């Protein structure tokens, strides 16, 4: 059986769930980039740094050997989004920097084009609501 390599950027609640699910399939090995090593399942490669702290050389090396990339490095939960509405924009900007960086390293995984649109200022008398939260997943060739 051929083993595939998954580059998982972020191993918080979402990333840890992805890592745990990959444990069910013996077809995947993981390279996890996250400063929180306590959530990483045993037997996987850990780079215990934030993605912005990883050098281009190290990232490029892992991009050449991985089959898939999952970016799960968004910060926040619904309470934090309600308290800090700008968090959505910060997460989108962080993802955009990552996508541009991967594309600039010549990765076969991404052809990045930013379709720019301003994020609307969303407020209501009751404060931010679920409709004001960003999409859960930003696609590299779509809008963030």
Image (cartoon, rainbow, N blue to C red):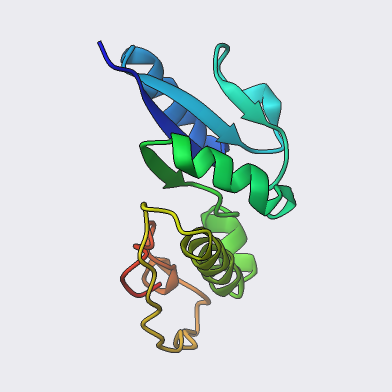
* Left or right side of 115 for 105: right
Q: Looking at the rendering, which quadrant does residue 113 occupy?
A: bottom left
* Left or right side of 135 for 16: right
* Left or right side of 100 for 1: left
Could one spot residue 68 in this view of the protein? yes
- Residue at 36%, 52% (x, y): give it: 109
- Residue at 45%, 89% (x, y): give it: 118
Query: Total marks drawn?
Result: 0
Could one spot residue 14 in this view of the protein? no
Residue 31, relative to residue 99: is it above or below? above
Q: Looking at the rendering, which quadrant does residue 48 occupy?
A: top right
Residue 67 locus on image (x, y percent): 36, 36
Residue 26, relative to residue 36: is it above or below? above
Residue 127, relative to residue 7: is it above or below? below
- Residue at 36%, 82% (x, y): give it: 115
Q: Quadrant of the N terminus?
A: top left
Which residue of the protein is positioned furthest toward the left in this rendering?
Answer: 1
Residue 111, relative to residue 30: is it above or below? below
Residue 5 locus on image (x, y percent): 41, 28
- Residue at 43%, 74% (x, y): give it: 132
Q: Quadrant of the C terminus?
A: bottom left
Residue 100 locus on image (x, y percent): 51, 68
Q: Looking at the rendering, which quadrant does residue 49 occupy?
A: top right
* Left or right side of 130 for 57: right
């Amino acid at each position: 059986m051929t083993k595939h390599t998954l580059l998982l950027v972020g191993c918080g609640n979402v990333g840890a769930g992805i890592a745990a699910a990959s444990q069910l399939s013996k077809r995947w090995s993981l390279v996890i980039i996250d400063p929180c090593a306590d959530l990483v399942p045993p037997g996987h490669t850990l780079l215990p740094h934030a993605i912005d702290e990883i050098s281009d050389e190290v990232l490029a090396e892992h991009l050449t050997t991985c089959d898939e990339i999952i970016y799960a490095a968004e910060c926040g939960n619904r309470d934090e989004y309600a308290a800090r509405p700008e968090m959505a924009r910060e997460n989108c900007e962080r993802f955009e920097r990552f996508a541009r960086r991967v594309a600039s390293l010549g990765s076969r995984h991404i052809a990045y084009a930013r379709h720019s649109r301003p994020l609307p200022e969303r407020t209501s008398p009751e404060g931010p609501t679920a409709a004001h939260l960003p999409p859960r997943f930003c696609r590299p060739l779509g809008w963030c």
